[in-house]
Image (tube, rainbow, N blue to C red):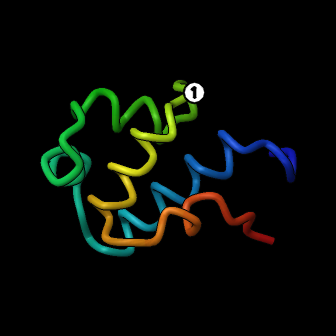
Amino acid sequence: MKKNDVIAIFSQNMKLIRIKKEMTQEELSFKSGLHRNYISDTERGRRNISLKAAEKIAEGLEVDLKELFLAID
């Protein structure tokens, strides 16, 4: 993964945070108001999501939006 690949960083962080919170994709889907397939595609880096969708995912994960964009060393 390239260090500045924002989609890959977002996807990886989203999945790691969701797993750390012991949350399924279906639970995140319900909490964020987004379809489960959308959550799955986003975690796999297959979607270039909108900022509004990113905000909904952050709310569903109960984290600050910026946490989803921070590069992991």
Report x, y in % for residue 45.
Answer: 57, 33
Q: Secondary structure at mark 1?
A: loop
**Residue drawn at 28 percent across, 27 percent down:** 37
**Residue drawn at 22 percent across, 55 percent down:** 24
In the rendered image, the quadrant that contains the N terminus is top right
Report x, y in % for residue 48.
Answer: 57, 27
Report x, y in % for residue 10.
Answer: 59, 50
Q: Which residue is mark 1?
A: 48
In this view, the residue farthest toward the front is: 52
Q: Quadrant of residue 67?
A: bottom right
Q: Quadrant of residue 8?
A: top right
In the rendered image, the quadrant that contains the C terminus is bottom right
**Residue drawn at 66 percent across, 39 percent down:** 7
Q: In the drawing, does residue 45 fall left or right of residue 24?
A: right
Q: In the drawing, does residue 56 fall left or right of residue 2?
A: left
Q: Amino acid at mark 1?
A: Asn
Is the residue marked by circle 1 packed among few (<14), some (14-19), or many (20+) residues within 10 Å? few
Report x, y in % for residue 19.
Answer: 37, 65
**Residue drawn at 13 percent across, 47 percent down:** 30
**How many numbered tags mark residues here?**
1
* Nearest to the observer: residue 13 or residue 51: 51
Does 69 appear above or below 73? above
* Nearest to the observer: residue 66 or residue 72: 66
